Each structure stands twice: as structure tokens, then as C-alpha cells.
Image (cartoon, rainbow, N blue to C red):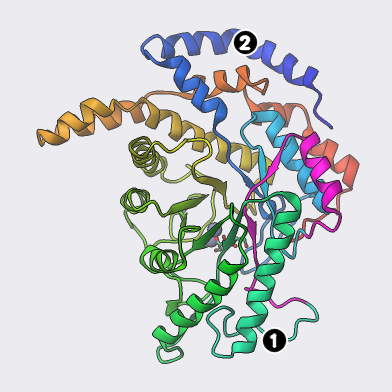
Amino acid sequence: MILDKKIIDQHNSQLKDKHKRAFDYVSGDIAQVDEILDKLQKFQIAIPSWALGTGGTRFGRFSGAGEPATLEQKLEDVGLLHALNRSSGAISLHIPWDIPSDAAKIKTLASSLDIGFDAVNSNTFQDQAGQEHSYKFGSLHHVDPKVRQQAVDHNIEVINYGKAVGSKALTVWLADGSSFPGQLNFREAFQNTLSSLQEIYKHLPEDWKLFVEYKAFEPYFYSMTIGDWGQSLLLANKLGPKAYTLVDLGHHLPNANIEQIVSLLLMEGKLGGFHFNDSKYADDDLTAGSIKPYQLFLIFNELIDGMDVKGIDHASGLGWMIDASHNLKDPLVDLLQSVEAIKIAYAQALLVDRKALKQAQQANDIVKAQEILQDAFRTDVRPLVAEARLRSGAALNPVQLFNEGNLRSKLIEERGVNSVATGL
Ligand code: AOS
Ligand code: ZN
Ligand code: ZN
């Protein structure tokens, strides 16, 4: 491990006094501060294997140096993030990019780093070498039953890899859609998708969940066969109790009210997983909270409200994950920033005075309601998030430590400049 506990302690003792002043200042006015810190310590956000390397754009890819070239190295990267923030305790694998050929070895390595395995992801949006049928015109929705069967078989294979490492969920995201009117019969495409998913669902272990991800457009620009939360929910309801909708924040048409969507999905007991990221236009996969932090806060505000009404555990009740792609920043730094932004939004939402908000709503006191929300949003909760990290043995300022500890240079020393991650 390139990050010694001693280095973390040293870093923390340097920042200790400044942190204490900031923490005392903000916590002085918060009655339930220990309860909030406890929740912050428990809250974990899974890291997708494909975000550990530099992503590309349509126009090119400028790989960073010292990227993880193997699954073992990807686990080590997540282990490093987790050591820095104690909030990234799981990795989400993507098949075929991350095949755990020796599952026992991979599990041992993961547990030595104190990380678990989040949802496994299938890939029917690319053709793999030696594959019999092409996904050029889709996978689970395809007009040809042989192509559908091949895609179903792949998903079953992914479940088996997931079982081997101890995952408990399968995420299905389909690049199935059409770019021209008339290309597809919508009803047939939907029915084909449903029957393919039903086949996959049959192979899901008892204690597993199936997450159905939707996306408004891209790679196809006229229609997507699972294009919005309505279509995903329709499928999840028809599939059964183990199927849920997965919300990726970047998969909506511009200005969609995502907080309203998550609130209703939660109400229906059908909100399963999350792909956190941020965007200005669509599926930009930018750092969480980098463009619309107020939206992220409003989403958490609805999540907490809904989870508390239903008695759902904040830390484990839903699948929290980042889905990002970095082509300018160091991917690890970017992930640290995303986790931080998510925890900040969570902490702010925990501060909302829910009783007072309810009263304001009942009295149609709009001004009061806005004041309550914005009062929480404008509280600087960074010292709370830092204190939770300190109590968990992590770094007070993970990004600073990553840079000052020259952690990327150490990874380059180990792996070489030209080490490039597999993935998109
Ligand atoms: C694609 O737009 C989606 O967000 C998916 O979750 C996808 O599977 C992921 O980006 C990995 O390829
Ligand atoms: Zn996603
Ligand atoms: Zn996406």
C-alpha cells in the first residue's frame, strides 16, 4: 500500500487546529451533531471500475499515467480512495472489462483493502472479439431472437461472476434504441426487452436485485428503448420484487425535475440504485456537485425524507454509486471530489428541519419552506464531513493529501507511465 497510516496521521495533525476551529463553529448550532456524524461515517459510495482510468470523448483519449491496468490494480486504486476518505468501500465491476478469473484471490485482496463488491454491470453495447452476433442494432430488444439470446446469456454470465465475488445486484444499461423514425416498432422493442429481462430475472439469486437503468438519448438520437423512468418502472413492475429502477443523474432531458422522480420512485418502493455525476447538458459524467450542487442537495432532501418515512437504512437501503468519466483531471482526484460533494449534499440534507418544513407546507408558507431548505443548503458542512472522516481514521483533506503525498507519482513508479486502464 503506497499510503501508510502514519502519513495520514501526520497530515491530520498538521490540519488539526484549523479543523477544530471550523468544526466547533458549525457544530455549535447543531443539536444532533453526533447522530449526523455517525450517519456520515456509515455512508459509503461505490466506485465504478471504469472511472479509475482516463475516459475518452468522441474525438480522442488522452490517457493519464500510472492507470490501473489489471483488476488487482483497480482494486488497489479503490483501496487507496477508501483509505483516504473511508467512504469508498466498494467497487462496481464491469464485464468483460473486469473478469475476475481467480475470484478467490480477488476477494482476498478486496477484503485486505476493506472493500466490497457493488453491482456488477453487463455490456451489450459493444461487440467483443469472437462474438457470434453483432449488437449493432441492439441487444435485449433486437428483432432477431438469436441476438437477444446471446445478450441474455451474457447477463447470466455476469451474474455468475458477481456471485463468485459476492455482489448482490446486476445493473443493466442498454444502448438499445433507434436513430430514425420508422426504424423500430416501439411496442415490439419494449416487449422483446421485457421478455429478455424476464429470462435474466429467472437467473437472479434470491437475495439479489436487478437495476434497470434508463437514458433519454445517446448513443441513439430518436428513441431509446428504456428512455425514461416511466419505461424503467414499467419494466421493473412487470419483472417483480427484485427489479428496481436505477437513476443516473445525467440521463434525463434538460431541466428534468430529478428530485421529484426519485421521490415518487421511493414512494413506490422501486428506487434501487444511483449513478451520481453532474452535467450541464446531458450525460456529461462530470464530477458530482460540480455544476448543480443545489440540485444534488434537493435530491438528497427527497431521498432522506422518503427513506425515513419508509424506515429505509440510509447507508445500505439503496445502491449508491458514482458513474463518471474523467478526461481532464486525475481520475482518482476527481473521484475524491465526487465522494466529497455527495457527502456534503447528504450532510446538508440531514440538517433540514423536517418538522418545520412540514408545517410550512401545510400552511402554504412558501417563503418559510424556501428559507428552511436554503438555510440547510447554505450551511458550510465541510467541517462535519471532515470530522466524520477523522473519526473513521481517514484524512481531513483527501485531495490535499493525494497531491502533497505525491500519490500519483508513486503509482507511476509502480506501474509505469504507459499503464492504461481497460474500459471505454
Ligand atoms: C451509460 O450511459 C451508462 O451511464 C452506464 O451506466 C454505463 O454502463 C457505464 O457508463 C459503464 O459503461
Ligand atoms: Zn450510468
Ligand atoms: Zn451514462
Q: Amino acid at mark 2?
A: Lys
User: Could you tell me how many numbered marks the image carries?
Assistant: 2
Q: CA distance from mark 2 to mark 1?
A: 59 Å
Q: Quadrant of the N terminus?
A: top right
Mark 1 vs ligand 1: CB below 8 Å: no
**Which is more toward the observer, 170 or 22?**
170
Q: Of 358 and 19, which appears nearest the observer?
A: 358
> Which residue is painted at 74% across and 86% down in the image?
132
Residue at image position (71%, 17%) is 11
In this rendering, would 364 be left or right of 74? left
- Residue lying at the far front of the rendered structure: 206
Please name the residue that numbered disc 1 is placed on.
133
Q: Which residues are magenta?
A: 99-128
- 101 drawn magenta: yes
Q: Which type of secondary structure does the marked residue at label 2 adopt? A: helix
Mark 2 or 1: in front is 1
